[in-house]
Amino acid sequence: MSNNEDKLKKIIAHAKEYGFVFQSSELYDGLAAAYDYGQYGVELKNNIKNYWWKSMVQYHENIVGLDAAIFMHPTTWKASGHVDAFNDPMIDNKDSKKRYRADVLVEDHIAKIEAKNEKDIEKARKRFGDAFDEAQFVATNQRIIERNAEIEGIKNRLYKAMEDDRLDDIKKLIEDLGIVCPISGSRNWTDVRQFNLMFSTEMGST
């Protein structure tokens, strides 16, 4: 068991023991991915909500509160971007059985390349001291130029595939980049599938 997993288990055990959070319907076999707040959990949640409300609304003269209905005309959800934005390309690793957002895997890969650039920049900054010109260094350093070109190419491929809803192209990009599962370390991926994270709900008698 990894250290992070051990810490998570301890946090969960503490939260249950002291009444912060319980699995929903736990007495009746429970309901996956749903949780109930216990006596301390309710107080903690309300404190956070009240602090957020004061910070984001009451402390600003140009902001007022609104408690709108959850049920709205379908066009409202379309205009807000929820209908389109809540479709997420997901991919599973066959070895770890873990599911990931495919675009996030690619973005994490880009972040690793950017971290290499930052490392080179910091090395140069220490070497040249006050005479260091970061803009000139980025514009002339061959390794950074090549990495930035690589990043731009990856972003273009990802955004085009997302815009055209080409899930096969997203998987091909993941394979071409040699992206591995953070858990298993393998490249044994399923096809990318589109998941709609919006719940379908009906009003009135059905």
Image (cartoon, helix red, strand yellow):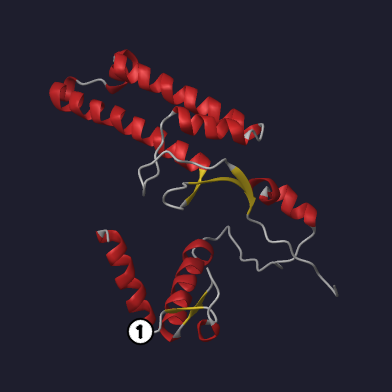
Q: Is residue 7 above or below residue 114?
A: below
- Left or right, 182 with respect to 134, comes to right
Residue 145: percent from the left, percent from the top? Answer: 36, 17
Q: Is residue 42 above or below residue 77?
A: below
Residue at the (48%, 33%) spot, across then down = 174
Three-letter residue code for mark 1: Tyr
Residue in front for this viewpoint, 133 or 178: 178
Residue at the (75%, 54%) spot, across then down = 76
Can you see residue 86?
no
Where the C terminus falls, by quadrant? Answer: bottom right
How crowded is the residue under tag 1: few (<14 C-alpha within 10 Å), some, or many (20+)?
few
Residue picked out by circle 1: 18
Residue 124: percent from the left, percent from the top? Answer: 19, 23
Residue at the (27%, 61%) spot, across then down = 1
Residue at the (39%, 39%) spot, across then down = 180
Residue 173: percent from the left, percent from the top? Answer: 50, 30
Residue 17: percent from the left, percent from the top? Answer: 35, 83
